[in-house]
């Protein structure tokens, strides 16, 4: 069952999204449970990270979708977010809040289905990240996305999830190795922290050899900003090929090289 929240003030759009989910479910065998919120304030007031997917309009009264998305990310960094909007110029801002996709109004089922295929893949990939914990005679399976941090005292470990605690015996070195693929951060000799729940890092010097501490997704965004500012490196061979295409299609005069072509843009 995939839990969906629809934050949308237009009833017609809500009904069509509901129909699209039902149609997609019949076609693929996926099952959905959805809750509708006519405005974002109610959605955010008592928010709990129980949703797999949030569809959110951008233009809404009282609080727009971008503002709501920023608030949502303060409470939940892993839920997939899809903007449903008539406004097509929010791609950069959508990147800032980790939007997975944009669906343009009026909604086309073909577009919806194409986007949903990628969304479902992301959900399945995220849900496959599970660790097994043996506590006495009980066996617990925890989703990594629900695990906020682990507190270690000797060989006693307390796993802090979003809504409960699990205690078991383990060592910090073994935990560090087990959670290495998920990039858990060791604060000191007692805590391993899921980086998706870190809001800020304050009052501490960086360890020797560490040049910069980045939050999840920050490296990709920095690279994106650099590409937007400096452009992409183009090899000499590719530059010649692009200049050749420009001449071939009549976009530049015969004999134009790549540098001349770029200066003329």
Image: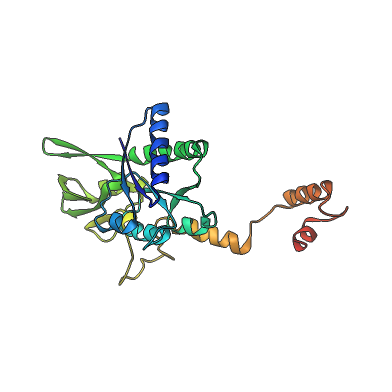
Count of numbered circles on the image: 0
Q: State the residue in front, 95 or 158.
A: 95
27 relative to 220, above or below: above
As drawn, is 173 to the left or to the right of 8?
left
**Residue depicted at 34% across the width and 71% down the height:** 205
Q: State the residue in front, 28 or 232.
A: 28
View extreme (bottom): residue = 203
View extreme (right): residue = 254
For residue 185, say whether it is visible.
no
View extreme (left): residue = 136
Give the image quarter of residue 263: bottom right
- Residue 167: % across, % down: 14, 46
As drawn, is 261 to the left or to the right of 165?
right
For residue 168, say whether it is visible.
yes
29 relative to 135, above or below: above
Figure coloring = rainbow
**Residue depicted at 19% across the width and 46% down the height:** 170
- Residue 40: % across, % down: 34, 56
Q: Quadrant of the N terminus?
A: top left
- Residue 112: % across, % down: 48, 39
Q: State the residue in front, 104 or 222.
A: 104
Q: Quadrant of the C terminus?
A: bottom right
- Residue 175: % across, % down: 26, 47
Give the image quarter of residue 15: top left
């Amino acid at each position: 069952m995939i839990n969906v929240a629809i934050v949308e003030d237009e009833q017609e759009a809500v009904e069509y999204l509901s129909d699209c989910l039902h149609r997609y479910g019949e076609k693929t065998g996926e099952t959905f449970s959805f809750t509708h919120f006519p405005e974002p304030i109610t959605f955010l007031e008592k928010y709990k990270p129980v949703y797999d997917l949030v569809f959110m309009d951008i233009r809404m009264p009282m609080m727009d979708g971008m503002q709501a998305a920023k608030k949502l990310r303060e409470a939940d960094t892993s839920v997939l977010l899809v903007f449903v909007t008539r406004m097509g110029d929010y791609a950069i801002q959508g990147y800032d809040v980790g939007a997975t996709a944009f669906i343009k109004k009026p909604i086309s089922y073909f577009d919806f289905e194409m986007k949903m295929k990628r969304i479902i893949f992301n959900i399945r990939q995220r849900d496959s990240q599970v660790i097994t914990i043996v506590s006495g005679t009980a066996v617990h399976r925890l989703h990594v996305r629900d695990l906020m941090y682990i507190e270690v005292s000797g060989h006693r470990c307390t796993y802090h999830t979003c809504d409960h605690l699990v205690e078991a015996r383990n060592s910090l070195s073994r935990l560090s190795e087990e959670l290495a693929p998920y990039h858990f951060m060791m604060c000191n000799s007692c805590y391993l922290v899921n980086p998706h729940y870190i809001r800020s890092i304050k009052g501490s010097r960086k360890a020797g050899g560490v040049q910069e501490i980045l939050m999840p997704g920050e490296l990709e965004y920095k690279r994106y900003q650099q590409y937007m500012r400096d452009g992409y490196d183009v090899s000499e061979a590719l530059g010649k090929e692009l200049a050749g295409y420009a001449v071939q299609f009549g976009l530049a005069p015969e004999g134009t090289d790549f540098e001349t072509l770029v200066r003329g843009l």
